[in-house]
């Protein structure tokens, strides 16, 4: 009977967080640009930010804007690796699927319904801290503003939606990270602002007759 060999178990390697790591950027000629991702020039004294629902968040951002940086400077030596926090604040149908509410009740929507609608977790300070600890220095936050707008013709975005976006930005800035706000797919927002109507399924669609007259 041929002898059989049982392979040795493979040990699991756990990456070690290192926010001070030197990252190598894109080559420039024959050189490779080196930079650190831990620019904390915007970090100042802690302050408490209170939101409309009474919740509070600690902010360390001092309002400093990094100036005299070209797009090339940002891409090559500042922004570093990035991650997309997608399928959260731009996820749609969160109200009707999670709360059995009409899809038009966005004026009072709780943004947590959208964040979890497609299976994602809450955006928290711990989440952003963890991303940064593994070398992520830029986050893209896609937002569908119509997830929180009033359908009465004023298109006012409810305070809860604005608060959710501000909290996510604060969590990133507390780590000195760069934030890209992406105006994402907005539930056919192009059909709003005086040029929309309801189809047979009560969904907002563009009123092409009104648009043609504009």
Image: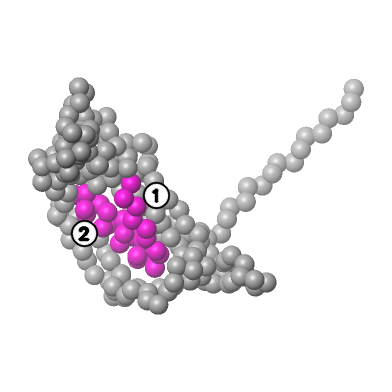
Q: Which residue: 41% across, 57% down?
A: 139
Where residue 123 appears, x then y in whole percent?
A: 34, 50
Dividing the image into 4 quarters, which one contains the C terminus? top left
Label total for image: 2
Q: Which residue is mark 2?
A: 56
State the residue lying farthest toward the right: 1
Whether residue 157 sits left or right of residue 179 in the image: it is left
Q: Which residue is mark 1?
A: 85
The one of 55 and 111 positioned closer to us in this rendering: 111
Instruction: Give whichever of discs 2 and 1 has the lower sequence position.
Output: 2
Instruction: Give the alpha-carbon distance from disc 2 to disc 1, as whole Å.
Output: 22 Å
Residue 8 makes an appearance in the image: yes
The range drawn in magenta is 160-184
Q: Residues within 10 Å of mark 2 (few under 14, many from 20)?
A: few
State the residue lying farthest toward the front: 213
Quarter-wise, where is residue 34 in the image? bottom right
Dividing the image into 4 quarters, which one contains the N terminus? top right
């Amino acid at each position: 009977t041929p002898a059989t060999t049982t392979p040795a178990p493979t040990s699991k390697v756990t990456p070690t967080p290192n926010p001070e790591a030197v990252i190598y950027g894109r080559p420039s000629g024959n050189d490779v640009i080196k930079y650190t991702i831990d620019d904390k020039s915007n970090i100042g004294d802690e302050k408490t930010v209170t939101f409309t629902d009474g919740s509070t968040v600690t902010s360390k951002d001092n309002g400093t804007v990094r100036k005299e940086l070209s797009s090339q400077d940002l891409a090559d030596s500042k922004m570093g690796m990035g991650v997309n926090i997608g399928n959260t604040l731009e996820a749609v149908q969160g109200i009707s699927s999670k709360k059995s509410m009409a899809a038009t009740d966005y004026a009072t929507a709780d943004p947590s319904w959208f964040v979890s609608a497609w299976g994602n977790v809450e955006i928290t300070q711990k989440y952003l801290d963890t991303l940064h600890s593994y070398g992520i220095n830029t986050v893209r936050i896609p937002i569908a503003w119509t997830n929180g707008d009033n359908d009465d013709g004023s298109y006012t975005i409810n305070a809860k939606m604005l608060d959710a976006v501000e909290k996510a930005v604060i969590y990133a800035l507390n780590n000195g990270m760069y934030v890209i706000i992406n105006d994402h797919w907005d539930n056919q927002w192009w059909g709003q602002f005086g040029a929309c109507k309801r189809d047979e399924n009560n969904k907002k669609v563009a009123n092409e007759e009104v648009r043609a007259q504009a």
